[in-house]
Image: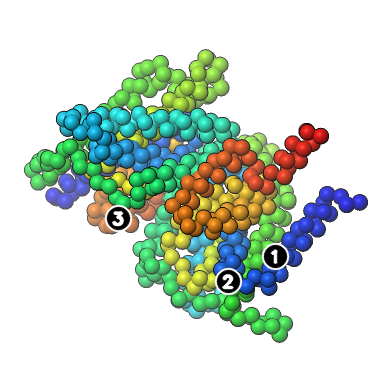
Amino acid sequence: MWNKVSIKKIIVAIAALMGTLLPFFIEDQYILHILISILIWSIMALGIRIVLISGHLNVAQASFMGMGAYASGVLATKLGWSFWFCLPAAGLVAAFLALIVGLPTLRIKGAYFVIITIGLAEVCRNIWMMWDSLFGGPQGLLGIPTPNPIKLGGLEIMFSSKMDFFYLALILFLLTVFVMYRFEKSRAGLILKSIRQSDLLAECLGVKIMKYKLTAFALGAFFAGLGGSFWAHYFTYCSPWDFTLHTSFTMLIYVMVGGMGSILGPIVGCALMMTLDEFLRPFKEFVPFIFGTILILVLLFFSGGFVSIPERLRKVLRRAA
Amino acid sequence: MEIFLQTLTNGIMASFILILVAMGLCLVYGILDIVNFAHGEFYMLGGFGAWWFLESHPILKSMPAIERYIVAIVLTMIIVAGIGIIVEKFIFRRLRENHAAVMIASLGVMSVLQSCALVSFGSVDKNITSPFKGRIELGPISFSEERLLAIICCIVFMILLYLLIDRTKIGKAMKAVSQDPEAALVQGINTGRIFSLAMGIGVALAAAAGALIGPIFYVNPYMGAEPIMKAFAAVILGGLGSLPGAIIGGFLIGMVETFVTTYVGAHFAMSLVFLIMICVLIAKPTGIFGHVE
């Protein structure tokens, strides 16, 4: 009577409950900050994955995050918008940019898309660096206000402590997971997978593959924009150095290490690798070496990432039995 | 006018160095069908190789300048080619089936090589005292001997690569593999060896570029990031997988970059390069010399 699906659902429910109650047990603000970072980075990683499903590699995810952060920051500081309007606006700006970039480059197969996203990352960084009057130049945009307080049924949330930010990040994260999950389980998800296997065949079957590729790309960018907006208002500043190619590469490493086969993969990857990163703080110069080695080993020997390890163990055990 | 001529000569040097990097990248893409993000790191290793052989190697110290320079470059190229072949054989070839995985693996190789260089050589910029210190005065423009040497070496490498691909049996085999690896295999071409060879030559060209630029500027573990991006732009502009395209693209990008840096500003240069690239992609999606697969 305890079939597999219900056990899985119960595990997810328990994990979600524990995650929700977590801030009440954690006194240390620093650990809370790391948890918030993991949630936000998971949103980015999920955005990379949804495009990767169709076989396209997006290495400008951090730039979309930065676009969201800067859009939100400029709207809040220069125009005085409330955070609750900045947040969706940031997502829309990032998604719009993705549509513009995706339109010419997703048409053709091959490496063009990857290289154009590299170019995009460079162009974005240079625009933020050079446009002093709007984006604050190399030292970044300072003085972004924290989110405006909201009243939720008599309870006023001030966004003065890390706990409030944690819940906001959790809501954004769950929203992303929900939308990504629905998107992938729908027809669109299947079509994206078919595009990776054979885009020509999919097109011949009458599928408008551009539409689906663009939707996936814009969806990933939209949530990256939301995450970026949160990031800007959480730190109250954003600088060009936070959203470089290197940041995107790191996100990509997290996705692959966790495993891109399922929604859980990027989340597990972010949680594991970011925790490892914190432990490796004293050996900072060795971190790229260790991460690079882990990435290569995972790709060579566990192509499904860390989330595929239980599955593999089960297979080995079954063969042994 | 003087500034213009000086910029022109600098631009030619920058373009030729860029062409070497872009040709290597193009060769690896054309034959192995992968976008090698780690290519810039081989360029960086080339710079460090030249630094090591010219600055600290005892045997080379006693040689005359030209021999020392040539021996250093050739040894660097051989060593870096060896590293490239190892990377190709043990990492890239195993992942060949999955395009995205190979690209991401090359990112891993990039961070490993970069941090290896950082740990073993340190992050401080290193100067290489060039064996050639003279300057050539040609009317209003002055030109250092080492820049001239870099240009000459680049042209020599380009001619050698052309001869290899166009005039030898190995070159023919490379062309065959780039068109259809399976059909090439059926014809009795050892595709594995061709993959190794292409990777070896590709990264050796990058290493040569690094070794030539080392004495002119400086060497540090992060020097690979900028040329690789310009080389990507050049290769896209010329058409992925086309060597003449890489040469034309490299020349255009190098010139635009040098002139914009001199007359407008360094930050603007890279953005303009990528904007040109995006515009070319919109107008002719496969680049100047590219063809649809």
Closer to the camera in the image, B221 or B7? B221
Q: Position of residue B92 (x, y in %)?
A: 52, 34
Q: Are marks 3 and 2 on the same chain?
A: no
For this orientation, the residue located farthest to the bottom is A154
Answer few, some or many: residues within 10 Å of disc 3's Cα (few below 14, many 20 plus, some between 14 and 19): some
Q: Which mark is residue B97?
A: none
Q: Which mark is residue A29?
A: 2
- Amino acid type at circle 3 is Ala
**Residue A148, picture quadrant:** bottom right
- Give the mark nearer the N terminus: 1 vs 2: 1
Q: Position of residue A66 (x, y in %)?
A: 49, 62
The reply to whether callout 3 and callout 2 are in contact (CB within 8 Å) is no
Q: Is residue B74 left or right of residue A165?
A: left
- Amino acid type at circle 2 is Gln
Q: Which residue is mark 1?
A: A19
Q: Residue at x 78, y 57 (%)?
A: A11
> Which mark is nearer the camera, 3 or 2?
2
Instruction: Decide if residue A61 is in sight here.
Output: no
Q: Chain of mark 2?
A: A
The reply to whether callout 1 and callout 2 are in contact (CB within 8 Å) is no
Q: Are marks 1 and 2 on the same chain?
A: yes
Alpha carbon separation for disc pair 3 and 1: 47 Å
Q: Residue at x 69, y 38 (%)?
A: A205
Q: Residue at x 52, y 34 (%)?
A: B91
Answer few, some or many: residues within 10 Å of disc 2's Cα (few below 14, many 20 plus, some between 14 and 19): few
Q: Which residue is mark 3?
A: B266
For this orientation, the residue located farthest to the top is B188
Local secondary structure at mark 1: helix
Local secondary structure at mark 3: helix
Q: How is the image coloured?
A: rainbow
The vertical placement of B255 against A77, above or below, is above
